[in-house]
Amino acid sequence: MKRSIVAVLSFLLVPAALFCQEFRGTLSGSVTDSTGAVVAGAKITVTETQTGTKVDTQSDNSGQYTAPFLLPGDYQISVKLQGFKEFIRKGVHLGAGDKVAVDAKLDVGDATQTVEVTADAPM
């Protein structure tokens, strides 16, 4: 009797599980410099343009990044790293269940120095 109940439940539940889909999408890609070398540690900000919702991530040691579980919509991707110009890609459309790859190529930026004084020097 138990075997027949298990068989019936398995028969009913397995097909239902097959039709379950993830409706959220994923943005991913690689970050390289102008020579094609991978860039690790770049800060990636993914912004949904209608709501302003932001997701932050970072490129790994192989220059790859992933921003998973994003709701369908239009996104802007910003990639920043000190010493490089900011990379911005606008108008990236992400549909239900989409996996979109956006690669970022960073160009060398102007070198700047900042000196911050936190206390007065003694007399």
Image (cartoon, grey):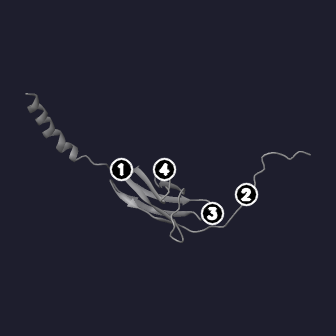
- In the foreground, 105 or 37: 37
In the image, residue 70 lies at what x, y percent? 40, 51
Task: Please give the residue where the numbered disc 3 appears in the rendered image.
Answer: 83
Q: Earlier in the sequence, mark 1 or mark 4?
A: 1
In space, the residues marked 2 and 4 are separated at their CA atoms by 28 Å
Task: Please give the residue where the numbered disc 2 appears in the rendered image.
Answer: 114
In the image, residue 51 lies at what x, y percent? 47, 50
Task: Please give the residue where the numbered disc 1 appears in the rendered image.
Answer: 24
Q: Which of marks 3 and 1 is nearer the N terminus?
A: 1
Q: Residue furthest top?
A: 1
In space, the residues marked 1 and 2 are separated at their CA atoms by 41 Å
Give amino acid for label 2: Thr
The numbered disc on residue 77 is none
Task: Please give the residue where the numbered disc 4 appears in the rendered image.
Answer: 55
> Element at badge 1?
loop
Q: Earlier in the sequence, mark 2 or mark 4?
A: 4
In space, the residues marked 3 and 1 are separated at their CA atoms by 34 Å
Q: Earlier in the sequence, mark 1 or mark 2?
A: 1
